[in-house]
Image (cartoon, grey):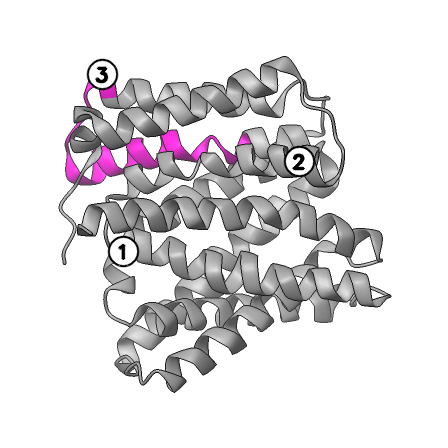
Amino acid sequence: MSTRAAGALLALLSAVCFGLVPLLGRVAYDGGADAATALLVRFAVASAVLLAVARAVGEPWPARRAVGALLLLGGVGYGLQSLAYFSALERLSPGLTSLLLYAYPAVVVLLTALVHRRAPSPLAAGAVLVATLGVALSVGPVEGGLGLGVALGLAAAAAYALLYVVSPPLLRRAGPLTGAGLVCAATAAFDAAVVGVQGPQWPSGAGAWSALVAVGLVGGAVAVTAFFAALTRLAPPEVAVLSTVEPVVALAGAALLLGEPLRGLQVLGGALVLVAVVVLARTGARRDLEVEVEA
């Protein structure tokens, strides 16, 4: 399998795992957990598993400067992004929050074009726009929200886009398991500080705790590792567009597992996302989004 094909599969695996997080998170929230506590458990479980597996398979420990950079990436970048997103979710409807977050693929393309001074072609830009439109249709009608919530949602999108652009050179300085484990550990420390300030809200019941642990394993260990590994094999804009599969997975999972009805526009939106992914993967649009990725 080629490096690029492996990167595409990893990006899609990451998107599927991230798409399952809202379904598992709903069970945890229904059991009494709040966002900060759920994030703490998620990243604590993920970091413990990843670092233990990295040691078991003999993955080398990165240099001190690389460790510091990865901890900064997790503690500041990923920690702030996650907190901004879930804080927006507390103020806005889930649909509007998701729509604001999934403005980030277009931001990734713009940031990459600015950094590398290379504008995407009309076909590449069209793939991004089609994917963004598909996400908007999948999310569906949204209710009005507070200005602070909108600002937090856009801040989460901007932070996520920035992570896409700055992560690859840092991640290539460590093994995939160790790198993801360090990022998750720093994010867990950030969330622990937030929980320490506002107080924890632990879930009650085995079902809610099982859901939280599953979020850590699926939406943390597997999703974050696959996401970072994809960023070392593909250009950030490619990973961003492939990741728009995530809300489609979330909607399909809600329909199949939670019995939530799917509207016609949601089905159309999901189809548009898949069309954009296929265009990106099989045509020259992919090459127009590429930047040099070191092996």
What residue range appears in magenta? Answer: 100-123
Q: Secondary structure at mark 1?
A: helix
The residue that mark 2 highlights is: 149
Up-down: is 4 above or below 74?
A: above
User: How far apart are labels 3 and 2 at the CA level?
Assistant: 33 Å
Task: Describe residue 105's horizontal placement relative to residue 150 as left or right.
Answer: left
Question: Would residue 38 be found to the left or right of residue 231 on screen?
Answer: right
Element on which disc 2 rests: helix
Residue displayed at 27% across by 56% down: 168
Amino acid of disc 1: Pro
Task: Tell me which numbered mark, 3 or 1, is placed earlier along the sequence.
Answer: 3
CA distance separating discs 2 and 1: 30 Å
**Label disc, if present, on residue 168 of the rendered structure:** 1
**In the image, residue 122 lies in the stretch drawn in magenta:** yes
**Residue 31 falls inside the magenta stretch:** no
Kindly state the secondary structure of the residue where label 3 is placed.
helix
On residue 29, which mark appears?
none
Where residue 263 appears, as percent x and y from the top left, is 67, 17
Which residue type does callout 2 highlight? Answer: Gly
Q: Are marks 2 and 1 in contact (CB under 8 Å)?
A: no
The residue sitting at 29% across, 63% down in the picture is 171
